[in-house]
Image: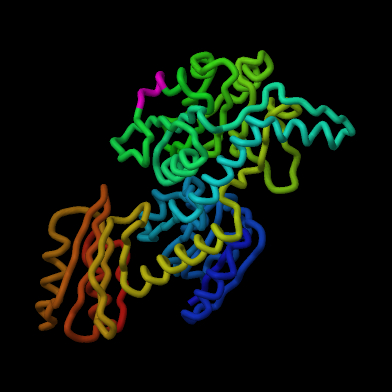
Amino acid sequence: MKALLLENISAVAVEGFRQAGYEVEAHKTALDERELVEKIKPVSLLGVRSKTRVTAAVLQAAPKLVAVGAFCIGVDKIDQKTASERGIAVFNDPHSNSRSVAELVMGEIIMLLRRTFQASSEMHRGVWNKSAAGAHEVRGLTLGIVGYGKIGSQLSDLAEAMGMRVVFYDTSHVLARGNARPVTFRELLEISDVVTLHVDGKKENQDLFGDQEFRAMKDGACFLNLSRGFVVDHEALAAHLKTGKLSGAAIDVFPKEPESGAGFESALRTLPNVILTPHVGGSTEEAQANIGSFVSAKLLDYVRTGDSLLSVNLPQCHLEYEEGSYRLMHIHQNVPGILRAINDILADREINIERQALNTRGTLGYAIYDINRACDEELMAQLKAVPHTIVVRAKGC
């Protein structure tokens, strides 16, 4: 089996696949659709990060592809609909870089409130301007966190340890950490000295922050976004920075992000006390190693046992695996009668079902079976011939 890894995925993942017996082809950069279509045909596992587009054309050119791993959080560049239709599992890692992002946010909050970045830029231009004007400690100030998930809650702990008061807003009911308290979105804007966004990529979050939201913030507050580029109107942000309504900002994500090394344009360029970074919130060696370990392990486990827990597109199906088991995995359209057809085939061949699990998700159904003896080509052919079958795989047969 072959694994194709793009965009300089951690060596931890490369080694994990090789130890599992895979032939690994690794590239430091992304491939465009044409290049990927040419390379994908013999590939069983594909690993990408945030730049590669895994389109319908790529997936349709991949007869051996079992799963795609996004070695990052976002999966918006993977055609999940086509992947599901072809029975290809998609996995990501929503957690392993959360500490890296939270630490960067905390550091940027301190730099904004102390105007450190602005002072450093002046020094590089040969300007010595020693002054306490506009510089503040973080202790005693209020941090407003919009989105209190893995990153937001870790940031909450770090900020509170630095002496900040923490308030948060989340659309879900979540447990507060430490002394943080939930507030309404409007109240958060009105009372926070610093507002930071940590929302997900759902469509309803598009244009979450614009002119009206910036007007509702405290005069002189700072604003940070290390979540998704499309949630903030950068023209409106630039306007409120220029008027002094906001005293500073740190932005790591943008509505349109160029390829590495390409030119970058933004309304926020050249503004003082604005920290701009090229989507590096989760880009630490520690985070990339953790992501490499996590996603590669999920991919290998899915191939070995069929465990689809944490897949972003397949039904969540798990059946405890025992070494030496004869395991069948059957992905199908979610219509009545599939299990009966499979069970009848096994019964007609006097094959006993020792364990089984089933789950559905939208138009898909996924069943995992452990049977009492090895399967053969004839059995596989019969299972593949069951109406509405998408993919049949076997392990130990």
Up the image or down, 237 lies above or below 165; here it is above
Quadrant housing residue 30: bottom right
Quadrant housing residue 277: top right
Q: Position of residue 108 (x, y in %)?
A: 62, 38
Q: Where is residue 178 in the image (x, y as percent from the top left)?
A: 37, 41
Left or right: 61 as drawn, with respect to 266: left
Total labels drawn: 0
The residue sitting at 26% across, 66% down in the picture is 330
Foreground pick, 96 / 38: 96
Can residue 13 be seen here?
yes
Q: Residue furthest right?
A: 126
Q: Main structural element of the magenta stretch: helix, strand or loop?
A: helix
Foreground pick, 347 / 291: 291
Q: Where is residue 176 in the image (x, y as percent from the top left)?
A: 34, 38
* Magenta region includes residue 61: no
Quadrant housing residue 66: bottom left
Q: Give the range drawn in magenta.
A: 183-187
* Magenta region includes residue 184: yes
Up the image or down, 231 lies above or below 302; here it is above
